[in-house]
Image: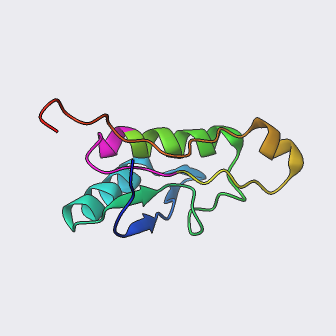
Amino acid sequence: MQLRGAFTALVTPFKNGGIDEEKFRNLIEWQIKEGINGLVPCGTTGESATLSHQEHEAVIRICIDQAGGRVPASANCRASSASRRSESICVVMYSSPPSRQS
């Protein structure tokens, strides 16, 4: 897989102390609609250092689900402590396989 173009380090919206899934999905849709080439959940602006393991995983899963293979997602695996790094899921890249017409 060759990566090209611009990838957005997505912010992680919160509401009432948790991830605001609706706003996050809307942000992903807007990014794709506006022509972004890829998404980076839990990136430099995605609060990765302060997310719990469960939140980190949820943000990545929501992003992959919402993108639906339309653009690749490259998740950040950085953590604020060695214990968090050891339990982190490290999804380096996700994209749907090429279609049979490719």
Colour mode of the rendering: rainbow
Query: Percent x, y for residue 83?
Result: 87, 43
In the drawing, does residue 49 fall left or right of residue 14? Answer: right
In the drawing, does residue 31 fall left or right of residue 18? Answer: left
Tell me what residue is drawn at x 49 percent, y 45 percent: 93
Tell me what residue is drawn at x 47 percent, y 63 percent: 10
Extreme residue toward the left, this view: 101
Tell me what residue is drawn at x 85 percent, y 53 percent: 81
The image quarter in which residue 37 lies: bottom left
Q: Does the magenta stretch include residue 71?
A: yes
Tell me what residue is drawn at x 29 percent, y 41 percent: 69
Majority secondary structure in the magenta region: loop
Query: Percent x, y for residue 59?
Result: 52, 46
> What range is drawn magenta here?
65-74
The image quarter in which residue 50 lies: bottom right
In the rendered view, would you say 59 is above or below 101? below
The image quarter in which residue 43 lies: bottom right
Query: Percent x, y for residue 58?
Result: 54, 39
Q: Which sits in the foreground, 7 or 27?
A: 7
In the drawing, does residue 68 fall left or right of residue 21? Answer: left
Q: How many marks?
A: 0
Q: Does the magenta stretch include residue 87?
A: no
* Image quadrant occupied by the C terminus: top left
Q: Which sits in the foreground, 15 or 90?
A: 90
Extreme residue toward the top, this view: 100
